[in-house]
Amino acid sequence: MDTPTGTCAACEKSYSSRGMSRHLSTCLGPGDRLHLAIRDRYDPVWWLHVSVTKSATFADLDGYLRDVWLECCGHLSSFEIGEQRYDSVADDFGYGFGPPPKSMRAKVSAALDVGDRFAYQYDFGSTTHLSGRVVGRVGGPKKRIVQLARNHDVPWVCEAECTEPASWICAYCRTTLCEAHGADEEAQCPECEAWLEESRLPIVNSPRMGVCGYDGPHERA
Ligand SMILES: [Zn+2]
Ligand SMILES: [Zn+2]
Ligand SMILES: [Zn+2]
Ligand SMILES: [Zn+2]
C-alpha cells in the first residue's frame, strides 16, 4: 500500500507526509509553534501534521489524538521521550527501570525541541503505537493545537477474491471486505469464518481501524 498524500489545511495543496514537512515550513512561515509530524509506528499510511503552542501540554496532545484517531473506550496512554514517560494516569511505580513516569500536565515545548523524536501508545492491551518527530517551528494562531494536514483516505480493497473498495474490516483476522462481502452481519468472514456480527468494524481513516470496537472519531463530552 502506497502511503497516501494529504492536503495542507492552509493552502489546500497535496503532498506526501515527507513533502508536507518541507512545504509547511514555507507555507506557514516562521513562528514559535512546534510543528509535529505524527504517524502510525508500523504502518505509515496514517499520518498527521499538527502545530502546538509553547503552553500546550501532553494532555492537550493526547486529547487531540484521541479525538481524531484513537478513542474507543477510555484506555490509558503514554508518551515516551528517550527513557522518560508521560502517562495519562501517572503513578510512582513505573516499570522498574528508567525515571518514574511524569504526568501529562508537562508542557510539550519543555520536553521536545526541533529534531527530537517521541513515541506514543494508546491502550496497553490492544496497543496502537504512534511515533512522532518535531519538524521545526512555524507560525499560526494562538490555539493550543492546530491540525495542519492529515493523510487522505487509504484506498483499501476487498480481499475476498474481489477488487471492490472495502468498507469493512474483520477485527479478528484484518481481512478487508466490500459491501457485498461484508454487509450481511449474519454471514461469516471468508478468511477466518468469524461471525461478521461479532468481528466486523467499519473502515475508518485511523491507525485504530479494526481494533477494540473503534468505529470512528469520538466526540468528547
Ligand atoms: Zn500549504
Ligand atoms: Zn477500547
Ligand atoms: Zn468484495
Ligand atoms: Zn476474519
Image (cartoon, helix red, strand yellow):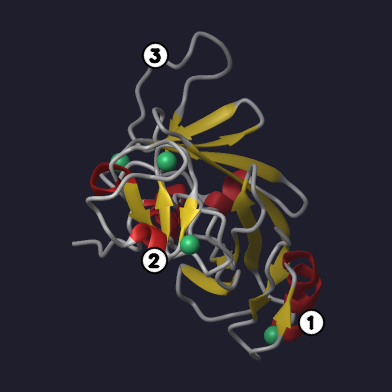
SS at mark 3? loop
SS at mark 1? helix
Report the side of 166 relative to 73 (left or right).
Answer: right
How far apart are the alpha carbons under marks 2 and 3?
A: 50 Å
Q: Is residue 211 above or below residue 61?
A: above
> Residue at coordinates 53% horizontally, 72% vertically from top-left?
147
Instruction: Say which of 176 and 30 sits in front.
Output: 176
Can you name the residue that lies furthest to the front here?
A: 161
x and y percentages locating residue 97 in the rendered image: 56, 11
Report the side of 89 relative to 158 (left or right).
Answer: left
Residue type at numbered disc 3 = Phe
Report the side of 147 relative to 21 (left or right).
Answer: left
Indicate which disc residue 93 carries: 3
Q: Nearer the viewer, mark 1 or mark 2?
A: 2
Instruction: Say which of 11 and 191 sits in front.
Output: 191
Return the disc, 3 or 1, that comes first in the chain's sequence. 1
Cβ atoms at labels 2 and 3 below 8 Å apart: no
Provide the residue designation for mark 2: 180
Residue type at numbered disc 2 = Ala
Q: Is mark 2 within 8 Å of ligand 3?
A: yes
**10 Å neighbourhood of mark 1: few (<14), some, or many (≥20)?**
few
> Residue at coordinates 75% horizontally, 55% vertically from top-left?
114
Provide the residue designation for mark 1: 26
How far apart are the alpha carbons under marks 1 and 2?
A: 45 Å
